[in-house]
């Protein structure tokens, strides 16, 4: 039993050595091995360049050199030479492994080797225990120390290597000084202190120096691990945060690109020009508050003598509003072209839009069919703003009875009403983005100001070369809106449509 206790430190040291080699292999494999085959080659690489073999090579090389020249060399110089040579071999062999494994950040392999060399340096405490007058704590103490080092080796793999593998899963560049300096500094100072304390123990048997040595080495060991683990975690957090920001930026760029395409599709769906007619002038515009809007307008001929026009405002904005807008626009035009009167068009549109309207969106709309021979406009209103009729420079609202909004409730029936236009009359239609536009003082543009700006009297706006006076009227309102809001953020889509009846 006594013999077993004496051999216990060596048994544990052997177990530690086996675990050390396996964990070093697993560490390199976890962090840098990205292949399914060739694990035998990887094991041979790690076996040829692990810190144990390098420690044996440097120790034997220094001992052989000293023995070859048959000279007595002091402990401090020999250990200093051995330490420097050991660190050089660590750097060279780790970079050799990194090249063989095609590792992007080669310094990471050096870091893994240095961290394992820290524990191996602590395991090799023979530099003190071999000194003639150094204190002997017994095999039980050595066994406990080896068990603690085995635990430290496992914890190194668990906490450091696992965290490090998160850093090496992508091709990243980073400052490696805080990874390399702590373990390298520990290995260097440990051997220097070992040499100094071995020398002091030989000259004077002072236990104070040996205890001081243990405290310093323990402090260095804790410092090295604390700095490394803290730096790994901080680097991981910073990189993950940067990657999230980059991913968000990419997502935003994709969304902006999609919205730009959606805006082009939406804009292309709105009519721009009309075949030149002598019976009327027409101009329309839409300025969306976001990339895509919920407002829409449309105009088209029904036969050769009827102009149909519509302006509408969807309750939703952005993509959902734009999608609902396209649906409503298509349905209204399809029903109007089928020959239904305006009231029946809205009645059927309401029925279709109420189907599968899970988003509970709705549309306000104003539909008119202008008889180009008589100037009579047959009208249906689904909760929309009253248009403005401009006759001989005087503007008045056409306040007809408004029906309920489209898609708001099933079973609604709309009534047809009429507006009589005379030659030279202008009919200005708009969405609430005009009257509800706000300035920096949160004041609304309002119906009164709109009526005032459209009552231009005899000072009729100069006609536009392409759209006549209708374009000038819309631009007059747009200019007044810009002056009123004075750069305040636009909160709603601004859409307007103007028709001038000229008669046959």
Image (spheres, rainbow, N blue to C red):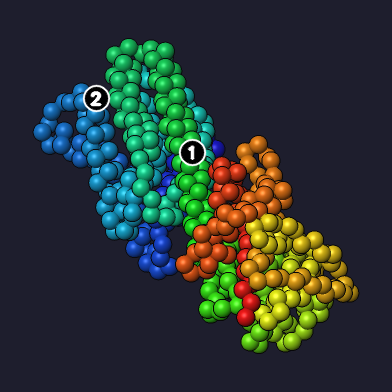
Label number found at residue 234: 1
* Position of residue 125 measured from the top left corner of the image (x, y, whole percent): 38, 31
Instruction: Tell me if residue 241 can be seen.
Output: yes
Which dot marks residue 55?
none
Residue shown at the point (69%, 52%) measured from the top left:
451
Badge 2 crowding class, 10 Å Cα cut-off, few under 14, some 14 to 19, many 20 or more, is some
Q: Is residue 282 left or right of residue 221?
A: right
Of residues 25 and 201, the one nearer the viewer is: 25
Check the picture and name the quadrant holding the N terminus: top right
Q: Residue placed at 76% from the left, 62% from the top?
A: 398
Residue 152 percent location from the top left of the image: 49, 38
Residue 379 sits in quarter: bottom right
Instruction: Examine the image and state in which quarter residue 170 appears.
Output: bottom left
**SS assignment at label 2:** helix
Residue on which disc 2 sits: 75
Residue 433 visible to an observer of this rendering? no
- Residue 375 lies left or right of residue 42; in this view the side is right
């Amino acid at each position: 039993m006594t013999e077993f206790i004496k051999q216990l430190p060596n048994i544990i040291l052997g177990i530690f050595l086996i675990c050390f080699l396996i964990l070093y292999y697993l560490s390199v494999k976890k962090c840098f091995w990205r292949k399914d085959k060739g694990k035998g080659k990887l094991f041979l690489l790690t076996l040829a360049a692990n810190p144990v073999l390098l420690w044996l090579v440097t120790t034997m090389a220094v001992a052989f050199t000293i023995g070859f020249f048959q000279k007595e060399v002091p402990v401090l110089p020999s250990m200093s030479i051995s330490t420097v040579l050991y660190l050089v071999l660590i750097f060279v062999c780790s970079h050799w492994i990194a090249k063989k494994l095609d590792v992007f950040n080669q310094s990471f392999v050096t870091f893994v080797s240095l961290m394992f060399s820290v524990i191996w340096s602590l395991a090799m405490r023979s530099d003190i225990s071999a000194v003639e007058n150094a204190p002997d704590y017994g095999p039980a103490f050595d066994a406990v120390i080896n068990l603690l080092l085995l635990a430290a080796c496992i914890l190194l793999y668990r906490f450091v290597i696992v965290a490090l593998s998160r850093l090496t899963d992508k091709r990243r560049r980073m400052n490696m000084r805080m990874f390399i300096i702590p373990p390298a500094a520990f290995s260097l100072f440990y051997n220097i202190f070992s040499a100094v304390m071995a020398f002091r123990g030989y000259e004077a048997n002072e236990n104070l120096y040996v205890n001081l040595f243990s405290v310093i080495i323990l402090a260095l060991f804790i410092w090295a691990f604390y700095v490394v683990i803290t730096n790994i975690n901080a680097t991981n957090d910073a990189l993950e945060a940067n990657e999230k920001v980059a991913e968000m930026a990419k997502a935003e760029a994709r969304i902006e690109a999609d919205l730009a395409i959606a805006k082009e599709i939406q804009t292309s769906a709105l009519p721009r020009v009309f075949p030149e007619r002598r019976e009327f002038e027409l101009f329309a515009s839409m300025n969306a508050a976001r990339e895509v809007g919920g407002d829409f307008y449309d105009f088209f001929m029904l036969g050769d003598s009827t102009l149909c026009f519509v302006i509408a405002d969807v309750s939703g904005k952005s993509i959902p509003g734009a999608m609902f807008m396209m649906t409503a626009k298509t349905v209204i035009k399809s029903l109007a072209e089928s020959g239904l009167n305006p009231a029946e068009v809205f009645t059927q549109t309401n029925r279709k839009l109420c189907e599968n309207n899970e988003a509970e969106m709705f549309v306000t709309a104003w539909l008119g069919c202008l008889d180009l021979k008589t100037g009579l406009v047959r009208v249906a209103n689904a909760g929309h703003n009253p248009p403005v009729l401009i006759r001989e420079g005087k503007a008045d609202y056409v306040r007809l009875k408004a029906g309920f909004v489209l898609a708001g409730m099933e079973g609604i029936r709309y009534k047809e009403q009429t507006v009589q236009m005379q030659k030279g009359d202008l009919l200005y239609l708009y969405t609430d983005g005009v009257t509800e536009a706000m300035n920096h003082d949160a004041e609304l543009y309002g119906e009164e100001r709109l009526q005032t700006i459209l009552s231009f009297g005899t000072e009729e706006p100069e006609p536009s070369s392409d759209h006549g006076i209708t374009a000038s009227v819309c631009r007059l309102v747009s200019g007044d809106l810009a002056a009123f809001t004075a750069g305040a953020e636009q909160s709603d889509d601004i859409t307007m449509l103007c028709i001038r009846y000229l008669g046959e």
